[in-house]
């Protein structure tokens, strides 16, 4: 490679290499792959492409052990921008979840907003129109002023971007724990629908085909964002604000329409979102998939800042941009479509057959690298780190219930649980999201799963995000099994058959053997559960380095579950429906297990005990039983028992129905179990169902065909109170006030204090 004498770059040294996040071994490997030393621009390219965020170098070996095939899957995990699942009738669902944790910790509004924008682009680059968005969020103690600031602005960023773009935010979850204080988790999920004939691919092939950049102009925002996401947060992180991109949802909406129009017109060979690592990522990954190369003139890239170098243009993560490979001769037609939508569409190069990426600027060849050498699945490094079982597991996993005094007032305990931020309604959050735009939302935020209809069919999809990080902390393998099981249970309770998952794996530093133990065990647990439930992994995201000098987050492998409702008459709500309906517990024995429970954490201030036991085969049989009952029209409502246990689940059923709030009278034998364990245990594989009196015999007959499933009648729907044995008796309006307004009141207090402080 020959450079002009006038071009000056910093000299590449070992120190500079390490500043770019590369090890000495990795630098030597780059030299070996290139057959020479890299220049500064090339070093920057390798630093972002070999970062954890892009290369998955510390996770891919384990990710490959997950089940990734199934009769409904149309693409293999990691091969395209998002997973793609066949739902019949020539239609498919594209869906994916990704993290934007570090950017949100530093600049919560833009960090969260651009997380939403990026995941939406992954969906419509598949040719799919986004029809739903979800999110999974984790923050520290909600009473902490900095946490409130992060919480408020993350929610606002998500809401503003989704609302302006015009996609309904239909569900998600929010948890609070001190482990997330400095490092919040912001995981964004999106879902779209596409006809099989219009699926687009992220590939570059066909020598001489033009390469076009479309959408917004390129600036300096987000440079080294991928590297920033691949290191621990520290006191210096505040200085990395320039690594946080700035989003524009209105431009993205135009980009969506223009992109889908070009795909429909069949002008494309391939298309990829410019997310992490920008142009260098899109060019290298598309070329590698197509077994090709590219010749790119960076002088042709529309830029919005003066004197941008090749290094900056290649690594910029400016938002709302795509890379397209267009059929030769159709460049002007693509240009005209994007011009109509007031967007750039500029030819910047061509596809070549030499499998190299050549980047030119100022008539000078600035970088020349084999596409394969840069990418995941090519020559990017792959590591499997040392594991060591954490000592804390031996200290925490055994508890003696007798050490905890039985409550004197069960009404008070239930109200405290209903008001704790991990259980209380997140209405304050989802009221800021437009959940009804596009008019497809059937069940929105606040239920076990969101349900969205597929237009022009009698089908719907159910989607849920789930993970209890506390369980994974206490038992990484079992905690991950429970995350998959609960996400499947939630879509089943809505009337859907679980078909596939996407995941967002949030962990600490993989070079720490105890962290890598958590990660490897969680992968094993996910593999166990996905195999039993026949829900292959379609793709997702790994986010390591979620820790700060003060703390590390709980291991949090978030599961995004997709379910299919074949007949919309099967859609089932979680809240009680009719006076006089009979209430049953289906599934596991009522039994008691307090380990890792919200009750222990809130009332006894203890994060201890093993995660609840789970029998995956029994869980699958329970889900099959519930689906059978729903499809036969036997069940009026279904709600899984999870955080807070039976008493909380019953209260939620009373106050979250689609009709008015309604009470229930419960009589449940203790079986010798202490009342607090009976009411607040988070034992797995249990679902509350309500059944009309005329259908009681039908559900009992059906249960005989699922003999491994316990079915116990525990009460009746009706009245203005929830009563449980002689221990709990609370008016429905008191339960509702506590459940729906606790977080709102906390945030209103924060706003009031802020106003007072500002005035003073």
Image: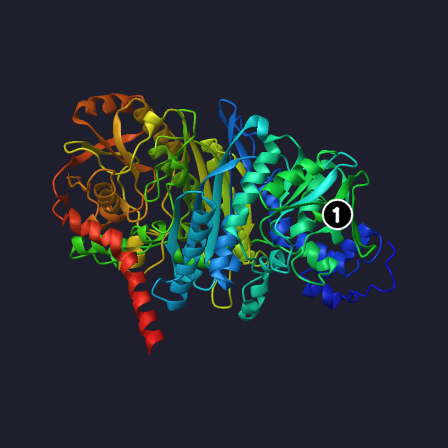
Compared across the picture, whether 743 is left or right of 32 comes to left
Give the secondary structure at mark 1.
helix
> Can you see residue 729?
no
Colour scheme: rainbow
Task: Please give the residue where the numbered disc 1 appears in the rendered image.
Answer: 373
Query: Image height check: is 601 above or below 623?
Result: below
Q: Identify the residue at horizontal 48%, vertical 50% (top origin).
A: 187
Which x, y percent locates residue 384?
63, 50
Question: Can the viewer see residue 701 in this picture?
Answer: yes
In the picture, which quadrant includes the C terminus? bottom left
Task: Return the x and y of residue 340 as percentages of the image width and height.
Answer: 60, 41
Residue 156 vs 287, above or below: the answer is below
Q: Position of residue 740 (x, y in %)?
A: 26, 51
* Near-viewer residue (117 or 343): 343
Residue at (57% x, 53% y) in the render: 387
Task: Decide which of 51, 743 is in the foreground and name it.
Answer: 743
Q: Is residue 416 left or right of residue 622?
A: left
Circle 1 crowding by C-alpha within 10 Å: few under 14, some 14–19, many from 20: many
Q: Nearer the viewer, residue 159 or 187?
A: 159
**Which residue is at 70% across, 51% downward?**
301
Label count reads 1
Location of residue 41 by image quarter: bottom right
- As drawn, the residue found furthest toward the bottom would be 760
x and y percentages locating residue 143 in the rendered image: 34, 65
Give the residue at x 15% y 34%: 579
Q: Work out which quarter of the rendered image holds the N terminus and state it.
A: bottom right
């Amino acid at each position: 490679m020959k450079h002009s004498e006038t071009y000056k770059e910093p000299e590449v040294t070992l120190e500079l290499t390490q500043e770019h996040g590369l090890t000495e071994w990795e630098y030597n490997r780059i030299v070996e792959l290139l057959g020479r030393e890299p220049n500064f621009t090339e070093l920057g390219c390798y630093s972002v492409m070999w970062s954890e965020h892009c290369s998955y170098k510390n996770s891919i070996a384990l990710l490959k052990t997950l089940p990734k095939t199934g009769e409904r899957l149309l693409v293999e995990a990691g091969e395209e921008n998002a997973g793609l699942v066949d739902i019949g009738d020539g239609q498919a669902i594209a869906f994916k979840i990704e993290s934007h944790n570090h950017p949100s910790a530093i600049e919560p509004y833009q960090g969260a907003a651009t997380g939403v924008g990026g995941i939406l682009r992954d969906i419509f680059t598949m040719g799919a129109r986004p029809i739903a968005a979800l999110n999974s969020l984790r923050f520290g103690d909600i009473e902490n002023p900095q946490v409130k600031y992060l919480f408020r602005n993350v929610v606002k960023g998500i809401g503003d971007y989704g609302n302006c773009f015009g996609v309904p935010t239909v569900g998600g979850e929010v948890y609070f724990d001190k482990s997330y204080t400095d490092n919040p988790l912001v995981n964004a999920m999106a879902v779209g629908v596409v006809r099989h004939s219009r699926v687009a691919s992220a590939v570059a092939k066909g020598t001489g085909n033009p390469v076009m950049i479309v959408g917004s102009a390129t600036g300096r925002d987000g440079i080294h964002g991928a590297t920033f996401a691949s290191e621990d947060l520290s006191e210096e992180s505040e200085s990395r604000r320039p690594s946080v991109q700035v989003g524009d949802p209105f431009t993205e909406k135009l980009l969506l329409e223009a992109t889908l129009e070009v795909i429909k017109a069949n002008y494309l060979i391939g298309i990829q979102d410019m997310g992490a690592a920008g142009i260098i990522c899109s060019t290298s990954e598309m070329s590698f998939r197509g077994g090709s190369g590219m010749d790119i003139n960076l002088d042709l890239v529309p830029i919005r800042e003066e004197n941008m170098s090749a290094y900056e243009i290649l690594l910029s993560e400016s938002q709302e941009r795509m890379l397209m490979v267009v059929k030769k001769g159709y460049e002007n037609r693509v240009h005209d479509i994007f011009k109509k939508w007031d967007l750039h569409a500029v030819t910047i190069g061509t596809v070549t057959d030499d499998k190299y990426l050549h980047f030119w600027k100022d008539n000078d060849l600035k970088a020349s690298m084999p596409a394969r050498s840069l990418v995941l699945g090519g020559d990017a490094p792959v590591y499997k780190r040392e594991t060591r079982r954490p000592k804390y597991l031996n200290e925490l996993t055994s508890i003696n219930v007798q050490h905890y005094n039985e409550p004197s007032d069960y009404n008070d305990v239930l109200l405290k649980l209903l008001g704790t931020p991990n259980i209380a309604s997140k209405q304050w959050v989802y009221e800021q999201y437009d959940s009804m735009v596009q008019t497809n939302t059937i069940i929105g935020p606040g239920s076990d799963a969101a349900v969205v209809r597929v237009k022009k069919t009698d089908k719907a999809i159910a989607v849920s995000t789930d993970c209890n990080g506390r369980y994974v902390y206490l038992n990484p393998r079992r905690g991950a099994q429970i995350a998959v099981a609960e996400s499947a249970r939630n879509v089943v309770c809505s009337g859907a058959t679980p078909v596939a998952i996407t995941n967002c794996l949030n962990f600490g530093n993989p070079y720490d053997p105890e962290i890598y133990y958590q990660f490897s065990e969680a992968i094993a647990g996910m593999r166990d559960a996905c195999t039993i439930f026949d829900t292959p992994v379609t793709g997702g995201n790994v986010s390591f380095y979620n820790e700060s000098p003060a703390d590390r987050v709980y291991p949090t492998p978030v599961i995004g579950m997709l379910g299919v409702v074949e007949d919309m008459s099967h859609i089932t709500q979680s809240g009680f429906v009719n006076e006089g309906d009979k209430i049953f517990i289906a599934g596991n024995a009522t039994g008691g297990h307090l380990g890792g429970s919200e009750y222990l954490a809130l009332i006894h201030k203890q994060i201890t005990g093993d995660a609840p036991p789970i029998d995956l085969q029994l869980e699958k049989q329970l889900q099959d039983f519930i689906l059978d009952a729903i499809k036969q029209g036997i069940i009026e409502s279904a709600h899984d028992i999870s955080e807070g246990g039976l008493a909380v689940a019953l209260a939620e059923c009373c106050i979250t129905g689609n009709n008015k709030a309604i009470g229930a009278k419960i009589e449940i034998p203790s079986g010798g179990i202490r009342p607090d364990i009976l009411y607040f245990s988070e034992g797995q594989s249990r679902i509350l169902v309500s059944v009309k009196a005329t259908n009681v015999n039908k559900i009992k007959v059906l249960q005989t065909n699922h003999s491994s499933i316990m079915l116990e009648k525990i009460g009746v729907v009706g009245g203005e109170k929830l009563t449980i044995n002689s221990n709990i008796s609370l008016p429905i309006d008191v339960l509702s006030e506590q459940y729906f307004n606790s977080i709102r009141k906390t945030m209103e207090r924060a706003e009031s204090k802020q106003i007072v402080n500002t005035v003073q």
